[in-house]
Structure formats: structure tokens, C-alpha cells
Amino acid sequence: MRTSTRTSTRIAGVLTGLALALGGAALAAPAAHADVTTCINQVEREIQGGEAPDSIRMACYVGLTGDHEQCVTGLTASGVTNGTAVTACRVAPR
């Protein structure tokens, strides 16, 4: 009977840890999404009414990882002005 109690306690501990880890990931995900969205929205203001293509979304995601230079390069390669690219990439990792 002692083994059964230990096993139950271990399972409960593992499940609690898993729930906490998944809960933390769920809380972090919306913040990350909002940062990429802010970057994309900054660019979409420049292209006035047009939806950002995948290349812009990817560049903003790169900015989210903290690679500001590559983010700017990706946005300008997609036709975004340098000033807008710098501003959009600056808000991505926040």
C-alpha cells in the first residue's frame, strides 16, 4: 500500500508541475503575439489598408527574437521605408 501512496503523490506532483508550466506558457503567448501584432500594425499603417504579406510577418517575428538588424533588413527588403522598419522593429521585442 505504501508504494501506491508514493506513486500517487509523484503523479500528483508531476501533474501539478505540468499544469504550472503550461499555464505559464499560455500567459506568455498572448504577450508575444501582441508584440508581433504591434510591429505588423506599424507597417500596415504605412501601406495604408493593405494586409502585411508573410515576409513582413516573418521579419516582425525575427524582431521579436531580439534581432533588430535582421528585422529592419527583412522589412526594408519587403518595401517598407527604413524609418518605419526601424520603428516597427523597435516595438517588436517589447
Image: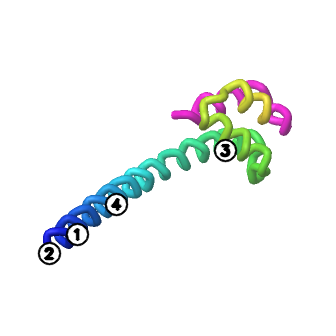
Name the residue tied to disc 3: 40
Name the residue tied to disc 4: 19
Name the residue tied to disc 1: 8
Q: Write down the quadrant of residue 63 in the picture.
A: top right
Cα separation, mark 3 vs mark 2, equals: 59 Å
Pick whichever of labels 1 and 2 is earlier in the sequence. Answer: 2
Q: Position of residue 69 (x, y in %)?
A: 71, 24
Q: Amino acid at mark 2?
A: Met
Q: Amino acid at mark 4?
A: Ala
Pick whichever of labels 3 and 2 is earlier in the sequence. Answer: 2
Q: Which residues make up the magenta segment?
A: 76-94
Which residue is located at x 66 percent, y 42 percent?
61
Cα separation, mark 1 vs mark 2, equals: 11 Å
Name the residue tied to disc 2: 1
Badge 2 marks a residue whose secondary structure is loop
From this view, report whether residue 24 is shown above or below residue 13. above
Callout 3 crowding tier (Cα within 10 Å): few <14, some 14–19, many ≥20: many
Q: Toward the viewer: 46 or 67?
A: 67
- Asked whether the residues under the numbered discs 1 and 3 touch, taking CB atoms below 8 Å apart as contact, a structural biologist would say no
